[in-house]
């Protein structure tokens, strides 16, 4: 909480982008830049940076290659096809691509949930704990603005900020609600077509690299158990939506109590209704071996993946056709294309076209 006040943000997620002036001794993470494919394409953004004097080194072949970046050199990430990687603390906050919403400054680990959820174009998706909206805009880009996103948050100011951010990013088919997701009725006909859910609930934030020295080193066992209880409750609630087929659960925590233990407990409570999906087999860090199948989960850390500490698990409903292949998300299979169509949705009739970066 103290860190949030000092950074003037309201959720752990707001702190995931690498900060200028990180605390002494904090690992130096690369600057990750997600290309907003609602407005442009990867090739155009690469060309733009090359015209600005940056040297493009191609697609990275290893995590180690990312750690050696320096000066005005950049790479295409080896795991996420819309993610560019620059040297640590490269500042793009005043860059026209950032201010216009063509690029999003987002830690690589924070990009994983939407990428692994990989909703099919035209789907209805819930973002259960949505602020500040980076993951929401990522989902919209994967959907190509076709379908509908229902995003929930309790704070009015956060919702207003999120709305501005989504509009700048060119997101059209979304509905924001100032509501506690736990109080959303899964039987409401409005959500009868929701087949994908993104769930990034409140957590200890223990995986965040850029902590101030006065921040508590580790949460108490009592606090961890309290958080885990909430996380189990909200995950079970999300899985109670009748049409949901696939869910991505994530935290920016390093603690087993909030990660593997939550997933294991919920899977046991759900019986044979849901299973873990073995996503992104090439990812080097897997879930802790605390229960059979935990290796299907992903972990991230500064040392192993050059990201903030993070955890992702993808759950899929059993007994029916899978939403996407279980071993590889759709987003990883489809190369980004220029000029993809945009469906404005019911609330926004005006058509938009991608703007070529000049």
Image (spheres, rainbow, N blue to C red):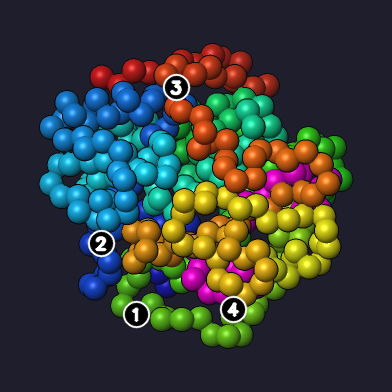
Q: Earlier in the sequence, mark 3 or mark 2?
A: 2
Q: Secondary structure at mark 3?
A: loop
Give the residue drawn at x 72%, y 49%.
316
- Whether residue 351 sits left or right of residue 120 in the image: it is left
Q: Is residue 195 magenta?
A: no
Give the residue drawn at x 35%, y 43%.
77
Crowd around label 1: few <14 · some 14–19 · many ≥20 (10 Å): few
The foreground one among 224 and 351 is 224
- Whether residue 236 sits left or right of residue 60 in the image: it is right
x and y percentages locating residue 258 in the rendered image:
60, 71
Image marks 4 and 1: residues in contact by CB distance under 8 Å: no
Q: Earlier in the sequence, mark 4 or mark 2?
A: 2
Q: Earlier in the sequence, mark 3 or mark 1?
A: 1
x and y percentages locating residue 48 in the rendered image:
24, 26
Mark in front: 1 vs 2: 2
| Segment colored magenta | 239-261
Crowd around label 2: few <14 · some 14–19 · many ≥20 (10 Å): some
Mark in front: 4 vs 1: 4
Which residue lies under the disc numbered 3? 337
Crowd around label 3: few <14 · some 14–19 · many ≥20 (10 Å): few
State the image quarter where residue 293 is shown.
bottom right
Which residue lies under the disc numbered 4? 224
Which residue lies under the disc numbered 2? 28
Which residue lies under the disc numbered 1? 214
How far apart are the two marked residues, 3 and 4, measured between alpha carbons? 43 Å
Q: Quadrant of the C terminus?
A: top left
Image marks 1 and 2: residues in contact by CB distance under 8 Å: no
Q: Report whether residue 358 is seen.
A: yes
The foreground one among 334 and 194 is 334
């Amino acid at each position: 909480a103290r860190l949030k006040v000092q950074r003037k943000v309201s959720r752990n997620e707001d702190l995931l982008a690498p900060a200028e002036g990180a605390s002494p001794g904090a690992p130096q993470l690369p600057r990750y830049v997600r290309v907003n494919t609602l407005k442009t394409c990867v090739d155009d953004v690469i060309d733009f940076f090359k015209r600005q004097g940056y040297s493009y080194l191609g697609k990275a072949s290893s995590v180690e290659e990312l750690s050696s970046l320096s000066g005005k050199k950049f790479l295409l990430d080896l795991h996420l096809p819309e993610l560019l990687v620059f040297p640590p603390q490269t500042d793009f906050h005043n860059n026209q691509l950032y201010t216009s919403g063509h690029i999003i400054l987002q830690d690589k680990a924070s990009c994983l949930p939407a990428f692994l959820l990989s909703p099919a174009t035209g789907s209805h998706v819930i973002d259960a704990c949505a602020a500040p909206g980076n993951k929401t805009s990522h989902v919209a880009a994967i959907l190509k603005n076709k379908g509908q996103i229902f995003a929930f948050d309790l704070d009015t100011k956060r919702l207003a900020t999120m709305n501005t951010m989504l509009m700048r990013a060119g997101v059209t088919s979304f509905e924001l609600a100032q509501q506690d997701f736990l109080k959303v009725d899964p039987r409401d006909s409005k959500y009868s077509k929701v087949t994908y859910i993104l769930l990034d609930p409140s957590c200890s934030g223990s995986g965040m690299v850029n902590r101030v020295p006065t921040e508590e080193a580790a949460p108490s066992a009592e606090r961890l158990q309290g958080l885990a209880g909430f996380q189990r409750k909200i995950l079970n609630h999300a899985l109670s939506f009748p049409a949901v087929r696939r869910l991505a659960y994530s935290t920016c925590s390093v603690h087993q109590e909030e990660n593997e233990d939550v997933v294991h407990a919920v899977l046991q409570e759900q019986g044979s209704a849901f299973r873990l999906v073995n996503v992104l087999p090439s990812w080097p860090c897997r879930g802790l071996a605390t229960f059979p199948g935990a290796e299907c989960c992903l972990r991230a850390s500064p040392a192993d993946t050059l990201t903030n500490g993070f955890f992702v698990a993808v759950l899929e409903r059993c007994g029916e056709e899978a939403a996407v292949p279980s071993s590889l998300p759709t987003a990883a299979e489809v190369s980004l294309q220029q000029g993809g169509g945009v469906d404005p949705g019911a609330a926004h009739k005006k058509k938009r076209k991608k703007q070529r970066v000049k």
